[in-house]
Structures are given as C-alpha cells and as structure tokens.
Amino acid sequence: MPRAAEISVNEREFILQGLKENIRLDGRPFDAFRSLELNFGDEHGVADVQLGKTRVIARVSAEVTAPFVDRKFDGIFNISTEFSPMASPAFEIGRPTEAENILSRILEKAIRRSGALDTESLCIIAGLKCFSLRADLHVLDHDGGLIDASCIAVIAALQHFRRPDVAVEGENATIFSIREREPIPLSILHHPICVTFSYYNAGGIMLVDANLAEEQVREGEVVITMNRHGEVCQIAKYGGVSVDALALLNCTSVALEKVKDITKFIQRRLEEDAKKRDVGGLIAELSAENAR
Amino acid sequence: MAPQALLSPLHQADGSATYSANGYSVIGAVNGPVEVSRRDELPEEAAIEVNVRPAAGVGGPRERHLESLIQSTLRHIILTRAHPRTLIQVTLQVTSLPEEESSVGDGSGFSFSSLPVLPPLLTTATLALLSASIPLSTTLSATLVAITAAGKIKCAPTAAELVRASAKVSSLHVFAFSVGRALLLAESEGDFEFGAWESACEVAEDACCKSVEGMEVDGEVENGQEFLRGVVEGKVGREMRWRTAA
Amino acid sequence: MPLDTSTYALALLRLDGRRWNELRRIHAQISTQAAADGSSYLEMGNTQVICTVTGPAEGRNTGAGRSGGKEGEANLEVEIGFAGFSGVDRKRRGKGDKRTAEMAHTLSTAFSSLILMHLYPHSTISIHINILSQDGSILAACINAATLALVDAGVPMTDYLVACTAASSPTTSTSAGSDDVSDPLLDLNAMEEQELPFLTLATVGGGEKITVLVMETRVRVERIEGMLAVGIEGCKRVKDILDGVVRGFGV
C-alpha cells in the first residue's frame, strides 16, 4: 500500500522559519481562511466546496424506511465519510485511517449530536415510516483543512436539499415525487461550522485553516465547532502541545467571527442558487399573466 | 447535450479528469505508478486497481462488477510491462446522475441497469490516464447502444429515452473500441438476436471511430476518438501558449 | 431522568451529596500486575479502570516499514476495552467502534507529546486499558490510569498528565437573575453527564496549560470559561492525589 510522502526536513524548517517571521507560504495572514468556493449541483442537496486546493463534495439523499424501534418519532440521519485514493494514494478503501475516523467522529458530534437537523420532522408515521437521510462525503482533493471543508459542505448540502412531500391519511402515507408536488426543505435548527486552529512554536503561534504542508509540521491542533448564535457545539483537542486556557478562549472568539462570515457566505450562495433556479418559474408566471 | 471534459482538475492526484455526458458526470483520478503491496504485486507488470464509487451510498456488487469490467479493459490498453512491480490506481467517482436514475431509488423497486454508466466511466478513466501520462497502447472510446423491441437501434440514448421506452427497450449494449477500430469490450444485457448485435456493433463502431471527413459543418458529428483528441489538444494548446506566443 | 436541580438549589448539594467543587473519591494503586512492565488500577467514584503498559519494546510491525511513528521516534499504541459488565446496558462495543477509537487516538496523541519518544527509536510502547465499571468521566479516568502505569513502567515523561471533567449547570443564585450566569460543577458521574454540558480536560502536571480538551455537548460560549477554570483547579487536585499514590508506593 502506498504511503503519503512525508514532508522533507528542509521544507519543515522553511515553513517554521517563515512562521516565526510572521509569514505564511501562501501570503495569508495567520487568522485567514483560504479562498472559499461553494457550488451547488443541478440536483438538490449536492454541495461542492473548494477551500483553496481542498475540494469536497457532499451529497444528501433521502429514502423511506422504518424508524429504529427505540426511536419511533425520529427519522434517521447518517453522515458517511469514506476516503478514496483520489485524495491521496495513502487512503485505502475498506481500511479507514485514523484521520478518517476522527473526521467522521467530529462531524458526528458537530452536526448530529448538536441537533443541527430536526430529526423529528423526518418522521412520517410514528414507528412505521420515516425518512432516512444520508450525507455522503466525497473527498476529491486533499490539501489540508478537511474537517472545516467537510463541515461546510454537509451543512450547505443539508440546507440545499429538498425532501419529497408526503401526505398522511391514517396508516397510509403517500410520497409525492418531485414532479407531482414541490419538495420541501429540511428543518435545520442551527448551522454548526468547524474551525481548526493549528499551533506552532510551542503554542506561541496559532494558525487558522492550515494547508496540508502546514498540517504536517504542526505541533497540535484544536477543532472548535460553533454556530453563529455563539454556541459551542464541540471542541476537540486530542493532545499535542499544551495551550493556555486563555488562548483557547481567545480561539472561541476568533472562531465565532469566522463562523459568522462562513454562515453568511453559505446563505448568500444559497440565495444566488435559488434565484438561478427560479428564473424559469418567474418567466413562466409572467407569461401566464400576459396570456390572461 | 454535447459531452464535456476537463483534464487535470485535481491537484493531489497524478492525473485526473472530469467528464459529463447524457446527464452522467464522473470525476476520475489516477495515481501511478506507485508502490504496491506485496499481496498485489505482479513480477513482470504493473497491477491495476480500479475503484468505482457511486454518487450516494457505499459501493455494492454493482460497483464491483463495473470495476472488474473496467479493470480488464484498461489492462489491455495500458502498457503494464513498462512498470513492473508497481501499481496504477484508478479511482472513478460518479458525481451526478440523470434525474431518472437517481429518482429510481425511491423504493419503486425498479432497478436501473448498470450499463448506461459504463461508457462515461471508461471515457473518464481514459482521460485520467492520459492526464497522468501513463503509457497507453491506444486510447479507448465507448458508447451505449439500445435496441428496441421494434428492432430499431439507438446509439447513445439518454436516460429519459430509456425510461420512457422502458417497456420497449429489449436490450442494451456497451461497446468500446481502440483507435485501430479493434473491439475492446462488449457487454450486453437483455434478449437479442445475433444479427441485431452485429448491427448494433457496427453502429457503435461508427459512433466511436468513423471518420467524418467533409461533414464538419455540423459540430455534433464528432466521434468518440476525435472527442478525446480534441480534449487533449485543447489542453496541450493552452499549456503551450507561452511557446506559440513567442 | 432530569437532574433534580431544585435539591441542589436548596442544599447546594448534588445528587450524590457532593458540593459543586468536590471530586469523587479517587483510589489508585500501581504495580498491580507483576507480569506487565507497568500497571495501575484507578477508581474515580464508581468508574474503575485498569491499565497495563508494555515497552519500550520491539513492536509487532516495525521493520516492515509501517511503524506508524515518526522517523527516529518510538511508536505509541493504545488499546481500550470495555468490559461487557461495565455499563448499565450490556451492549458490546466492538473493536471498530469509532468512539473507542477516538479515545485511543486522544490518549496516544496526548502522551506522545509528553513521553520522551526520541529516546526509543524503532520501538513500541503499548498501553492497554480495560474499563471495568463506567460511571462518568471515563476519558479522564483512562488518562489518569495511563499516567500512573507509565510512571510505574519507568517510561521517561516530562510530567504527569492529569485529567478531570467539568460541567456547567443552570445557576442557582437567585440574585443574578440573568441567563448568562451558570454554576460550574467538577467531576461528573454518569447521570450528570447525560444531563449537563460538560468537557474533559487534561493538564500537564496540574499546571495552567491544557493538553487535552474534549467537549461533545452544545453550550453557550460564555459558560466555557467557568468550566475551564474549575477543570484546571480539579486537575491540580488530581495531580496531588496521583503524586501521593506514586510517592506512597516508593516508601
């Protein structure tokens, strides 16, 4: 099995020296994200996120199943993250790496456990039928910041997704296809966004959104998930260099600022996409008026 | 919609390509030649590993079947003996499906054939291999052919056409040809006469390899091989701009 | 079952009779298993953990090139097992369980930065933890037990890594009246963990610097400061207790 090339000693020294002189290799300030791009597919629920050279596609799909016996009133929501050799030859299919485990755990905690999606609204008939939602995450290009990019992609895809409409009569539920009835958006309670901070120089230097080379030379990291209302959904610092408590509190305030920016960006892109989709509808409406 | 392709959209992989046609979009990446595990190592040639990943869900038997078809086809066009004891990894990720196919999963019980996605996968794999500069003996172009119950042959039908005539399409065929018009892959399903298969094969060969001299007025008439050539020429042209400008 | 905060408000005592800043009883022993290079047994209230350390020794898969550790450093392996009888429901946690894998990852990255790994290139240090009884603060108990076992094994470390949990409960002081005020709690048991937002934190040698910080529940950002402060204070006390255990063994 091929292994990812480790960063060379010279490159490591170069990056660290640069950081000590307040310079990042790509010229960004220490607390800046790379350029973020977000595109939606032709279908609902497909979000393509590019964070610098990192590229992730999230795809949300729904089907109707029976709910879990112990959770009769809840729908099912799963996030599936499987790395493919596309992102890096070191990723092998069917053998999850540690990075993959951590990514899926953090997304699970950030999005599922924090109750971002109202699973009760996915219930059709209690105990019999519910929507089972799955978000598939495809990592196409890996240049660091996978957790941040993946979280943005899943949140954007969930907001973009429309589930089929249903009508319930007693024990029978009719699920209408997209052609029959306008599908409806999911009920999302809040929008958690992850921000990763990387530490260098024994915790003295803190970077936001490190790229792959910077990730390989970092001494520790902390992933903070927040929503724009100032709630922290998850913090994960799995070791590495020790940091002052005050520095960590400072991270949360930086994260809050970034989260607000990103949430606003997603919102803007969603509105633009909605406008693009609506063009046909608007013209059709206008022409109908003219005919009358 | 005319097929579209883009070479080397990804940074991390050695070679990559996106290709979309008939509502299918596929993104492919090739890593190679890379280190191979002892288990898969072949003493005199490169091992080829193909991974097909569906748009939604994890791969199942259907993907494994497609992988084996693609792997055995690519094995014959890659000059594997040039890189003994190495691995060439081909990863193909389906990114979008035609609406007809993606909505079939809503529990209506009708399963969509696995053949329509095969030609885009093969084309993407070829483009990605070209992008990774893996030595090939020939390029490959593939197409789907449907034969209706009435005996009509339809080349490269869209998913909408297949579903609409769901009752009428009696067989589906995928053919892949090399530049030298050699048949590389023939995969069929449904019931059909041998004569019908032969004529379907001819139609496919025309679609893939027939030269269309003097007919270039109509831009649509472009065979599969010319399409590949055009994509690569376009990329080389763009990359060599600095030289031509001087 | 919701936490009965009314009792807390009246008597300023928690369900198990503790005050807000009180640790549960910590009882620990080291060198419990003669066969292992280092071992420990730790109780934090009703949470019970045993830990064994093997190594530094030749690893199982070194030599084949997949040592996992960085060049010229030792490799740290962590395995965590939950006993079938440890929890309330007899649910088996398989080896592929992501939560267990995450805990193992936490321990291995946290201790990698503390152990002087460069002294043992091409070797493996493995930590095996078995959880005998679960009653909250499991990750913290694992970290504390691993610290003791590593000390017992004589693996050179810069300092102790000590951990505890801290939570934030709705305020009981009637004077403040605003929603922002909350009362922090120290060292949670399983029942409190289900009800309250909490975090697990680990500090080096009971100092001010935080090595591990894991929080899984949603909480207002203002509440974190209080939780951290209480947690750091708790870690200091845990350090003294663990230090006492080690010194007591030496006598």
Image (tube, coloured by chain):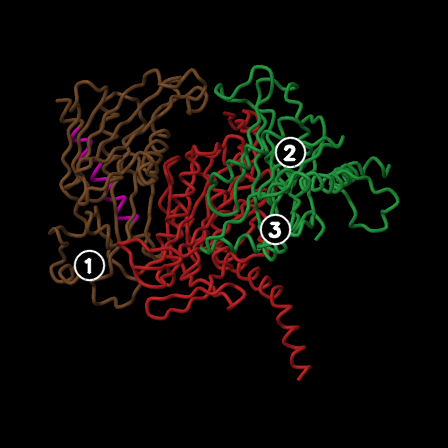
Q: Three-letter amino acid code at disc 1? A: Pro
Query: Residue A24's spot in the image, x, y percent?
Result: 57, 39
A212 left or right of C28 in image: right
Crowd rating for badge 3 (residues with CA inside 10 Å; few <14, some 14–19, many 20+): many
Which picture quadrant has residue A275?
Answer: bottom right
Q: Which one is in front, A77 or B1? A: B1
Which picture quadrant has residue B93?
Answer: top right
A68 over A288 or under it: above or below: above
Query: Residue B20's spot in the image, x, y percent?
Result: 65, 47
Magenta range is C228-245
A224 over C59 or under it: above or below: below
A109 left or right of C148 in image: right
Mark 3 or 2 closer to N-term? 3
- Please tell me the colour of chain A: red
- Please tell me the colour of chain C: brown
* Alpha carbon separation for disc pair 3 and 2: 21 Å
Query: Residue C24's spot in the image, x, y percent?
Result: 15, 43
Q: Which one is in front, B96 or C176? A: B96
